[in-house]
Amino acid sequence: MNRTRIIFVSIIAATLLIIGLTVLLTNQGGGSAGASLTVQRPDVVSIRILTSLPIEPWVRNAAEQFNAEKRTIDGAPIQVQIEAVDGLTALGRWDRNEYGALLNGQTPETLTDEERKALEHFPVAWIPDSRYLVELANASYKERLGRDVFLTDGEYRARPIAISLFAWGLYESRARVLERKFGEINWRTIHDAAIAAGGWPELGGEAAWGFFKLVVPNPARNVGGLAAMIAAAGEYYGRTNISVEDVVNPEFQKWLKELMGAVTDFSSSTAYTAEDFALFGYSVGDGGQLLESDLLQNMQGIITRWEDPLSIYYPQYLTWFDFPFSVWVGPETTALQKNAALEFQRYLLGDEQQKAALAYGLRPANPNIAVDAAPESLFTKWAERGVLSIVPRTTAMRSPDRDTLLALLRWFDLNVKR
Amino acid sequence: MSKPSFRPSKRATQNRAAALVLVILLLFGCGATVVVNTVRQVVDLFTSEAPAAPTPTFTWAPDSAVLTAAVSPVMAPVLRELAEEFNRQQRRTPDGKNMQVEIVTYEPEEMVRAAQLRPPFQAISPDSSLWLDRLEQLWQSSFMEQGREGESAIPIGQRRIGAQQRYAVSPIVLAAWEDVARQLGWPDAPVRWQDVQRRAKEDPDFKWSHPNTNHASGLLAVLAEFYAGAGVTRGLTVELATRPDVLEYVKAVEGTVRFYGENEDRVVERLEQEGRNFLDLFVAQERVVIDWNRRHSGERLIAIYPAEGTLWTDHPLALLELGQLEEELAVTANQRRTFQAFAEFLTAEPAQRRLLAAGYRPADLSIPLESEGSPFAGTDAVDWRQPQTTLQMPPAEVVDVVRDYWYYTKRPTNVYLVVDTSGSMEGAKLTATKRALKAFLAQIRGDRDRVGIIEFGSGLKDYSLLAPLDDPTRRRLENMIDRMEAGGGTALIDAVYAAVATLQEENQPDAINAVVVMTDGLENESARRLSDLRVLLRSNPSLPIVIFTIGFGRDADEAALTEIARIGGGQFRRADEADIEELYRIISTYF
């Protein structure tokens, strides 16, 4: 080969080499379809769990113990991360797909590396306050994907991990006056107290107490506010199923608005209504229907700060939260992550953690555990304040449908919040 | 044997020619690409539109563990100390980054404004959750304006605020000297907002004050006036709040307010400077009463919990959900860890006891308020069993109406802005001053407020007499500000003297009469002396004129400015290019 040819071949080779290298580097930088899809066993199986506020302290504590025990799945250690989020807020985020679920036709294989990396933070499970929130999330995704994303049967079905009822909590000094005046504490007598034009003196209480002040969580921050309105509607109509027609009834709306007129401040109330109730005492609220576990957890603080304990009463129509542990079944999370979530679910339902829940005022979902099964049970500690191990009346409010919930939220937004 | 031929064959010649053409084409291609790209870059350099001015964006590393928190001025000193202690603990994130908390001070209203658009902080701690609610409202409005609400049937969850933690609370009280409190009926009878309002209207010597409505305590005081004027203690509506007789009532009560101000700590400063006679009563957090009584051995302040009800300041620490806007950085995972750790630090017992010692009620309910050593124990100046009730916080639209109408019912203001445009103000100083003066005008919203400007150098350079701030006056004043040019010496005292003399000629004792004077240099041209100004100010005791002085930069005559502020019953403040706009904005809250 002569010199000219050598030069010629060298130039061609160099050109091809440059082109080859360029193509290679380009594909490495932002390639999508051609990247390796081999799933390797990770060093750690990390699972993010969205947890509703009332059970978050218990679940977080359990997760710390679980992580410390270095439990594994297929040989890889499991790390549980708990993220506290109100049930209704989480539902709004699912509904807007803010967590980034894949759209119809998308698969992890069609994503860029960056998009795939973002999916690593996708919630593996959700523990909302109530199963009806799961149903609403499923309804939202069914429209979008044509299938459920949280299952109601089978291995990955949503399982309640604890239970808490809604109960009346009233400062004892105020409760005595109301009982003297009305006999029974229920939504109708509370409504009568709320509209008393002369305030507490008219009800037989002290002038310094001002008007009767009702505590209702702001539904935009705490799903308990929605539960309270549903319970009030149940007692107003004397039945357990509430429909859109009931919510839009002008007479009911007038009654409900009068009731809400006794709330001191929706604007600065946080998601932690019972904590606010304890921190600001009777100055912001004489009483309200709140989650039993929240009331029990704050009882000691109320006594220390205000020297006026709460008295607890159970309503005629019971509303409760069952905190279903719901595993996301879509392709956004791996099988290993889903099974790790189930492992943590089993841990929460075990005897040890179910007994631990008693110290948070939560009723065990595991039927083997009684509410007085642990010495630190708040049900035992505060029995004299009116908390009952077994609630005798069993009339339970049915879960409202999506349209009824939205009608209540819209009414609140237009008539109370604004 | 034939001689080898060096002549190439025809085919070889053709191949060589083709190869040569290919090489030339390749080289030409490469060269052309380089040339084209270079030419394009050069052409772009001259022909493309100038890039838009970069939006000020505050950056932090993706793994940053430094959390910057904007804190209201009343809490900033305590929180800064606690943050320093937290930082000394050298806590680490899982990836080894040092968790650090930095505290910056913001007025609540300004904090909310800044938090909406690429703020230079990741967390906020205003004095009340009211401001968090305000921020969420504004955020959701902007969310709806973008048409994004239609994407969701569940109208919940579009938040600017993520995790939050209260670490201390304090009820808002009427802080009164003990003899004043007893005259009002304390401790035997309940004292109402109406008792204070009546006393102020009936007794011209009664001096009281509340901050403006940019603060929780100022908002509460004004709300209480609207409630009292409407004759209700709950259910305040827009219709009630705007009834003419209600507005007349509020106007009459506001006419008795000695002065408004940026916050209660400034009131305390003035009490310390001027003594007992400065005020009889002021609206403040309960912790101010505790703090005053601890530091002073003379006459006590008493916390009166108004019988109709009060409000709470609740000092939330809230993490912002950043990263939702274009070019806005998200809060890093490490910053979230720092937030969580700092929130836990603040609510742990040692910090909670420190907050209790500072006069706040700790958020930790396991700490009893009446225990030995607690500032609530063994005193009747504050009562931990109080308040018994709170005023109802009306819906946001009513609060907005109350705040807007307050500007029209509050005491009117006559204020002269006296501005040094001497030669040393040339450049960045004058630019910043112009911006600050316009910010001041934007803050003055009352239709009875009048503003004038005096521009001085070696002598009077330009002026605009007092005039109500309607749209034509605003435009005229803004044009005057735009025309300002640096040059000449500094006839400071002559300019202040002219402003005071004009206010005296106007002689409006029902209004707040004030001069805000700014200079960056030394007095060197005035015909009058400080003693002349003193004589002039004393010549009409029934017309108090307050003088605020601002020393701009390091060369300002601080001694003269401090003395002018002292004889004018006002304050001296320092400023530089970075904060002069904010300072003018703060001073505007006094009017």
Image (tube, coloured by chain):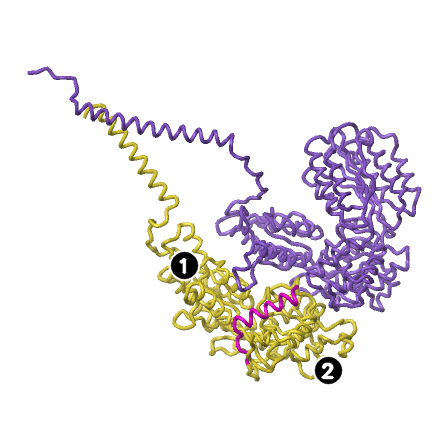
* Most common SS among magenta residues: helix
Q: Is residue B566 above or below residue A266?
A: above
Horizontally, is A156 left or right of A281 in the view? left
The amino acid type, in three-letter code, at marker 1 is Val
The amino acid type, in three-letter code, at marker 2 is Lys
Q: Residues within 10 Å of mark 1 (few under 14, many from 20)?
A: many
Dot 1 or dot 2, earlier in sequence? 1
**What residue sits right under mark 1 in the picture?**
A45
Using the rendered view, name the quadrant where residue B482 is placed.
top right
What's the CA distance linking mark 1 and mark 2? 59 Å
Q: Find residue B490 and report its horizontal and vertical position in percent.
A: 80, 30
Q: Are marks 1 and 2 in contact (CB under 8 Å)?
A: no
Dots 1 and 2 on the same chain? yes
Kindly state the secondary structure of the residue where label 1 is placed: strand
Residue A181 - label:
2
**Tag 1, which chain?**
A
Kindly state the secondary structure of the residue where label 2 is placed: helix
From which residue to which does the magenta span run?
A396-418
Chain identifier, colour purple: B
Q: Find residue B283 and report its horizontal and vertical position in percent.
A: 79, 57
Q: For chain A, what colour was chosen?
A: yellow
